[in-house]
Image (cartoon, helix red, strand yellow):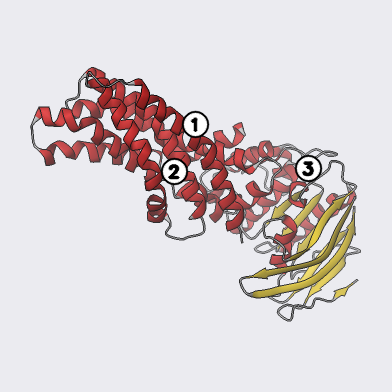
Amino acid sequence: MRLVAEGLSARRGEDLIFRDISFEIAGGEALLVKGANGSGKSTLLRVLAGLLAAEAGTVRLLAATQPVERLGEAAHYLGHRNAMKRELTVEENLTFWKAFFGDFAGGAGVCVDEAVDTVGLGGIAHLPFGYLSAGQQRRMAMAKLLVAWRPVWILDEPTAALDVAAERMFAGLVTAHLSRGGIAIAATHQPLGLEGLRELRMTGFTGAAETVW
Amino acid sequence: MIALLARDLKLSMRAGGGALIGVLFFMTVVAVIPFGVGPDLNLLARIGPAILWIGALLASLLGLDRLFQAEREDGSLDLLLMQETPLVLTVFVKCLAHWLATGLPLVIASPLLGLFMNMDEVAIGATTLTLLVGTPAITFIGAAGAGIAVALPRGGLLVSILVLPLAIPVLIFGVSAVYAAIQDPAPFLPPFLILVALNLFFAVIGPVAAAAALRLSSD
């Protein structure tokens, strides 16, 4: 499985956010998108997820276990917001997403209890999501990545609001995902504690992004 | 899809879900009409079906703006958009859940409110039946408006204004079917069947339009 992005450009309103970004990631590899605030990291990730139309360029997932029209179908997207309902309990939230996502061919998600245990919050899944602290909410949002199998993880500032232990836990999750042959693309300021990362440095506004491998 | 239906129904029952807001509004509107119009029983019986229909129309529009806005605010909309499941189907199921939670209570409450308006059994039955067939159409039309206004912070009124012109035919044929049932020479079936047709028409057009609007709105 390979993720190939070619000549991506994106525009928000009048402004060109970035221009001509190309990269290629194979299964088991992670790409770290770095850059100052406003340099277009989130925009790039939203373009990859198919949530924002690219001005130019293509994103393709080659040799995937099932043919995909858009990369989004094969990807989990963890954005700034957690996509969990405050009124429902954690368990109801995760059960819903598990059923709604379904598994991508070639893998299977873990059950809800196991996912909650993996993020280290076993025993509070019966609480409404709104009762949890910001860090706990973020961890539960990560449990969402585990309940259904998607080969590609697109992570936007995944470790914001997390303590050091949770950051380590998350690095473990990503490592486990990569070892299953998955792909991870993360925009972050913190070092994720991962080995053998490739980096994409966004320079912003000027439109030119240089790639540092 | 069943999971989505179940989740939306559950959400509408929980605090802040607003399933009962619509039916309370409906009851308030219809209950104050006799005080405003006066105790002329014949007049009330005559305007009753129209009042029930107008009340139900306005009550259905009440919670529509939250249909996609709540999903957008917590980021769920992004994930709904990304899936392989056709977005049209997702929107259709959300509309269905919304109607079950807010439209169906209106239909169930309408016989009681018909008594407030001194309507006879035939009129009450016809009104309930036409509301049952007509209110889903209003929800489907409203979904298109809700999709367009999803990114606007105060889209509620805008949704109503966008949607109202399209909902007028539903209102016209709904009310005329009821009057046809209670006044002898006019046949009941033609307006009623047009109402059914409108419902089916908007069940297709509404979700397609809403899905297109949601795709364009994402930023």
**Residue type, label 2:** Gly
Q: Which of these two is toward me, A133 or A138?
A: A138
A70 on left or right of B62: right
Q: Position of residue A154 (x, y in %)?
A: 75, 56
Q: Position of residue A115 (x, y in %)?
A: 73, 43
B131 on left or right of A44: left
Badge 3 local density, few (<14 within 10 Å), some, or many (20+)?
Answer: many
Q: Chain of mark 3?
A: A
Residue B146's tag is none
Q: In the picture shown, does residue B157 fall above or below B101?
A: below
Badge 2 local density, few (<14 within 10 Å), some, or many (20+)?
Answer: some
Q: Position of residue B130 (x, y in %)?
A: 35, 27
**Residue type, label 3:** Trp
Q: From the image, tell me which residue sits under label 3.
A: A149
Q: Nearer the viewer, mark 3 or mark 1?
A: 1
Is residue B9 in view from this perspective?
A: no
- Is tag 1's residue or tag 2's residue first in the polypeptide sequence? 2
Dot 2 falls on a residue whose secondary structure is: loop
Q: Label 1 to label 2, Cα distance in Å?
A: 27 Å
Q: Label 3 to label 2, Cα distance in Å?
A: 31 Å
Is residue B16 in view from this perspective?
A: yes
Q: Which of these two is toward me, A117 or A200?
A: A200
Dividing the picture into quadrants, the one containing residue A146 is top right
Q: From the image, tell me which residue sits under label 2.
A: B17
Dot 1 falls on a residue whose secondary structure is: helix
Dot 3 falls on a residue whose secondary structure is: loop
Residue B200's tag is 1
